[in-house]
Image (tube, grey):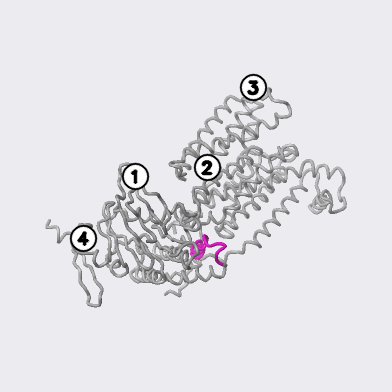
Amino acid sequence: MGQAVTASTLKVCASRRPAAVPVLLALAAITGLAGLVGLGAGPMRIAPLDALQALAHRLGFAAAGIAEQQEAVLFAIRLPRVLLSLAVGAALATAGAAMQGLFRNPLADPGLIGVSGGAALAAVAAIVLGDKVFHLLDAGMRPWALPVAAFAGGLAATDLVRRLGLRDGHASIATILLAGVAINALSGAGIGLLTFLADEQQLRTLVFWTMGSLGSATWSTLPLALPLIILPTILLLRSTRALDAFALGEREAGHLGVDVERLKRRLFVLVALATGAAVSVCGIIGFVGLVVPHLLRLACGPGHRLVLPGAALLGGALLTAADLAARLTVAPAELPIGVVTALVGGPFFLWLLVRRLRLTDS
Amino acid sequence: MSLDAQSVSVRIGSAVLLEDVSLAARPGEVLGLLGPNGAGKSTLLSLLAGDRKPNAGTVRLHGREPRLWSPESLARVRAVMTQSTAVAFDFTAREIVELARLPHAGHTDAAEDRRIIAAALELTDAAHLADRLYPSLSGGERQRVQAARALAQVWTATDDAPSRFLMLDEPTASLDLRHQHTLLESVRRFVAAGVGAIVVLHDINLAAAYCDRVALLDRGHLIACGPTRDTLTIDTLAGVYGISLAAVDDGAGARHYFVRPPSLSLHV
């Protein structure tokens, strides 16, 4: 009897887990390829290899291979945009994976802790009410007003959610979840009110911001935005083993030597920083944080040593691909990238839910 | 004394979970914690594990309060198996046991860790489950995997302290008869190697068979604590559990307890 292998016992066995290093190398290759394709595609086409040679030339490794005009488009327009999509995709996916580990729930999302809601409310407020304030600013500062407001709004909302979840120095995950839902609902109400107050021009800006766009990528914003997005993402990658232990439960992780309160504080701050910085530059881009970690868990198992860095790489690749679709499908116009990720991510998410229900039923 | 609680009390609001309890666990023996539901057994275990601070009194592990230890060195000295066996995400059983070696990173090599993980799974009769996805396991199978994790965590001696402790909260709750005994046999093997074990049990016969000493708790108070046979007297048990019992010595040195069903003893 013990030897009988039925279909159901086969299904519950993990197929051999792939080794981390080859998977990450393959993902890095995919990400690099997505970046090169992203550099090349558009009204002026540049072959991926030419784009690679131009990059090498700029770094001093190879001879110039493409026309001056192509090079100008490549470096002035495409490169900042691709760098931004790689960084934002990596940040959103890694933050999503970390949130799912922290909440011990595969359906958690960085938005749960209020960061996107708060950022959106502040951004919309800046768009609608900003004219009355921003004319006081120096002309050179004005492009920064929106992202700075969004970043501050995101962090403020997250801090509020965290304070609501604190009791005797102990952060209650369940209370944080509920507080996040409430803060998001309040932000939604505030956004609704401001939308009602907005004029035509403001409405257009507002709608584009809440649906996400990588169009803001320029060399003037990137030097500040990129480190703010990338640094917390890299720091998140250092909590992989602690997140594995967290899957057993908070107390149990503590028994394994994880400083649980410190881990929660750390993840909270890093996720808020990474997501806040990403959202403040690009607006709301949904589903990346949800779908990318899922794909990795399905393919490679739930170990965070692979899921977190894998999510960073795959998130960057997928967002670059999504941006490609946003730029090319209705060219010369541009789809909001949040619409693209939702169009692809939404059905995928539903499929996951249905699949989960089936698994728990059987 | 290497792990002792002195006059510890725990209150949450006006509810008293533990009141002025003193007891010590020693390396090389199994200490059983017994008592009715809500007696404070798990609360006492969480104090000894360092999960929480008592409102009054002190807990000392090798002379130091648990929260003065670094979390990692504390984890190398004591392992805890709680009643919670839920795990988020589809880890395999082996991956769950691998987590036991987390606090030992940098102290043991990977080959040694693999050997310990395999041996621990073997000891709780869970080796054949190693590649199964944990969420697909039955309650008893999960409990064996969690027990293997606790054992693997304190498998070898550590430089951090002279002795290790194993704390198990109702480890036999979902186990079948054979696995109840094989698990507690494994605990005895650890104890023979110098580990101190603290085990919450509901089955008086298991306590009688495997515990060197027992502590009987009732509504937050320590009723009795001492060598198993002297402490588990019919009168004490009747007082604590509110049920009538009989005991029989089998002549081979073991004592067996029988419960008289309440409907027969309560003179309704």
Amino acid marked by disc 4:
Thr
- On the image, the x and y values in percent for residue A199 come to 63, 24
From the viewer's side, name the closer residue of A221 and A350: A221
- Same chain assignment for discs 2 and 3: yes
Q: Quadrant of residue A295?
A: bottom right
Q: Which residue is mark 4?
A: B236
- Neighbor class of circle 3 (other Cα within 10 Å; few <14, some 14-19, many 20+) is few
Amino acid marked by disc 1:
Ile
Which of label 1 and label 3 is nearer to you? 1
Tag 1 subunit: B
**B106 within the magenta span:** yes
Tags 2 and 4 touching, CB below 8 Å: no
**Main secondary structure found in the magenta portion:** helix
Inter-mark Cα distance, 2 to 3: 32 Å
The mark found on residue B12 in the picture is 1
B81 displayed left or right of A86: left
Tag 4 subunit: B
Q: Tell me where the magenta segment starts and ends, as one range.
A: B92-108
- On the image, the x and y values in percent for residue A59 come to 82, 50
- Neighbor class of circle 2 (other Cα within 10 Å; few <14, some 14-19, many 20+) is many
Q: Secondary structure at mark 3?
A: helix
Identify which residue is drawn at 57% across, 46% down: A346
- Neighbor class of circle 1 (other Cα within 10 Å; few <14, some 14-19, many 20+) is few
The mark found on residue A112 in the picture is 2
From the viewer's side, name the closer residue of B128 and B95: B95
Tag 3 subunit: A
From the viewer's side, name the closer residue of A27 and B85: B85
Amino acid marked by disc 2:
Leu
The quarter of the picture where the N terminus of chain B appears is: bottom left
